[in-house]
Image: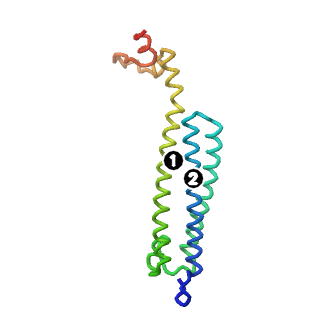
Amino acid sequence: MSQSTGTPDLWTTRVSDYLDQLQSCVERLDESLDEMRMGTKRLEISQVDQSHQELAAALEDLESLIAAREELIRADDAPGPGMTIRDILATQDDEFSQSLVQRCSRISKDVDASRERAVALFVCQFHLADLSQSLLSIMRGTPGRQTTYNNASDVRRPTDVGGSILNKSA
């Protein structure tokens, strides 16, 4: 913050612009994840593919924003040293810098929530991809593991896997 005019200095203004871009990127990530989740839920492959492309584009933007963040941290006009933008801003006493610290914290939480959602969606899609194979195994009446891979010394009693449970119930 400029001491004489009470207006944000150039570095702080660049940080504010950076946070605006980062927030926009996180919102696009969330929208893509929402669309992908709904497409997965409805089994709409074209929507999932489109959402995947949008997610990939948003992740590319996020990568470039990470590089921009590093430039801001190392900038010559930064008000002080620090490992993160939040660290640098926390050394400032003005209200605007402190509001940016709070924005950094909120955006950080949003990014973390997006990461958790992305991992959950990946796990869901991974299991759905295997679901058809599992259902086919049940309907064929074969065990989940092909007999070719059974160990000859495996003398354990066979379990009701594959279609045998359906055959027995019929």
Badge 2 vs badge 1, beta-carbon distance below 8 Å: yes
Say what secondary structure mark 2 lies in: helix
Q: Residues within 10 Å of mark 2 (few under 14, many from 20)?
A: many
Q: In the picture shown, does residue 20 fall above or below 36?
A: below
x and y, in percent, of residue 37 in the image? 54, 41
User: In the drawing, what numbered circle is on residue 141?
Assistant: none
In the rendered image, the residue lying farthest to the bottom is: 4
x and y, in percent, of residue 76 in the image? 57, 80
Q: In the picture shown, does residue 40 fall above or below 156?
A: below
Say what secondary structure mark 1 lies in: helix
Which mark is first along the chain, 1 or 2? 2
What distance separates the C-alpha of mark 2 from that of mark 1? Answer: 9 Å
Give the side of residue 146 with respect to residue 47, left or right.
left
Judge depth for marks 2 and 1 and give the one in front: 2
Residue ID for mark 1:
118
Q: Residue at x 49, y 76 (%)?
A: 97
Q: Residue at x 45, y 73 (%)?
A: 87
Q: In the picture shown, does residue 168 fall above or below 40?
A: above
User: In the drawing, what numbered circle is on residue 29?
Assistant: 2
x and y, in percent, of residue 124 in the image? 49, 38
Q: Residue 54 or 71: which is nearer the viewer?
A: 54
Which residue type does callout 1 highlight?
Answer: Ala
Which residue type does callout 2 highlight?
Answer: Leu
The quarter of the displayed image where residue 15 is located: bottom right
Q: Residue 150 or 132: which is nearer the viewer?
A: 132
